[in-house]
Amino acid sequence: MNVHISIKNVGVRYEKTAAVNNVSLDIPRGAATVIVGESGCGKSTLLRVVAGLQKPTVGEVKIFGDKTKIAFMPQTYGLMPWQTARENILLPRRLGKGLGFWRKDKLSAADEERFNDLLQKLGIAEITERYPRELSGGQKQRVALARVFFARLPILLMDEPFSALDAITREEIGRVFGALRKKVGMTTLLVTHDVNEALTLADEIVIMKKDSQKGGQIFTVLDGAADFGETGRETPEFFGKANKIRRILAEIAEK
Ligand code: ADP
Ligand code: MG
């Protein structure tokens, strides 16, 4: 396996809480790994550690390649309130070019086209000049998605990226994401608590078990169904897999 991200014996404790306990996981280059698990099992904490935004209490994360080439979409979107949607989406690119927060940047014709196409597909073409406070939750989430999608960095970390979208939009955007991954092949680590979504997007599914005493741990790792394709999602095999994951989640739920 060509490992891109290696998580080794990572544990995280906050002052009063054990959040993550002894998590080890290798993520292959170009693969999509999806983490599921009940609220509070440490998913967001683990993702922040992988993003390099938080130091683990023990253990380490190794990125094989450029550590600065990581796109991270936090659960709270991370939009800058003083920037318009357009500025927010282009922020990583500006920072990447060392242009800082305030200098303007002009896109090439090709990038402008890619930018407009992406906004069209995400359904936010009309709101690019608005500030985050002028957007609904779902629109903010789509702006945050546009930001990490447009950046096209080799590693993509997303924390419940579709949670504020209605079912139809969610599927449409899932397809935009699928097409982008096919084209660019970013190594992806994504957190969700939607089982069908997890299966659809994942090459591999990691089920985490909450433990308030010791911190959340990996319970098991299963094959996803990213390779099933659109029609494969209507098959008994897909439903079988989904049911199995639901059963496990119900069994390991903290009492
Ligand atoms: P999940 O994303 O799976 O819901 P989190 O990683 O957000 O889980 O949280 C795991 C545990 O750590 C929870 O008990 C949560 O209350 C706690 N926690 C998360 N962030 C902090 C923080 N910044 N300070 C203290 N405790 C935290
Ligand atoms: Mg979370």
Image (cartoon, helix red, strand yellow):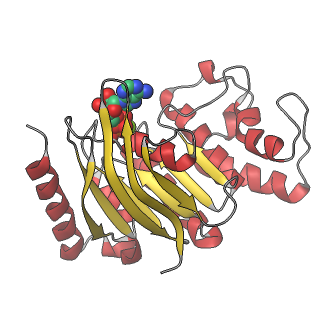
Q: Residue at x 71, y 34 (%)?
A: 88
Q: Nearer the viewer, residue 81 or 21?
A: 21
Q: Quadrant of the C terminus?
A: top left
Residue 147 placement: quadrant: top right
Give the quarter the ligand 2 occupies: top left
Q: Nearer the viewer, residue 127 or 102?
A: 102
Q: Nearer the viewer, residue 96 or 111?
A: 96
Q: Residue at x 19, y 60 (%)?
A: 245
Image position of 249 (left or right of 76): left
Residue 41 placement: quadrant: top left
Q: Work out whether 7 lies above or below 254.
A: below
Which residue, as the protein is rendered here, is positioned at the far front?
58
**Count of all numbered marks drawn on residues in the image:** 0
Q: Residue at x 20, y 75 (%)?
A: 237
Residue 247 placement: quadrant: bottom left
Residue 54 % position (x, y): 52, 38
Q: Work out whether 113 lies above or below 75.
A: below
**Residue 16 shows in this picture:** yes
Residue 195 % position (x, y): 27, 54
Image position of 115 (left or right of 255): right
**Residue 197 shows in this picture:** no
Image position of 91 (left or right of 57): right
Residue 160 % position (x, y): 42, 43
Residue 251 % position (x, y): 8, 51
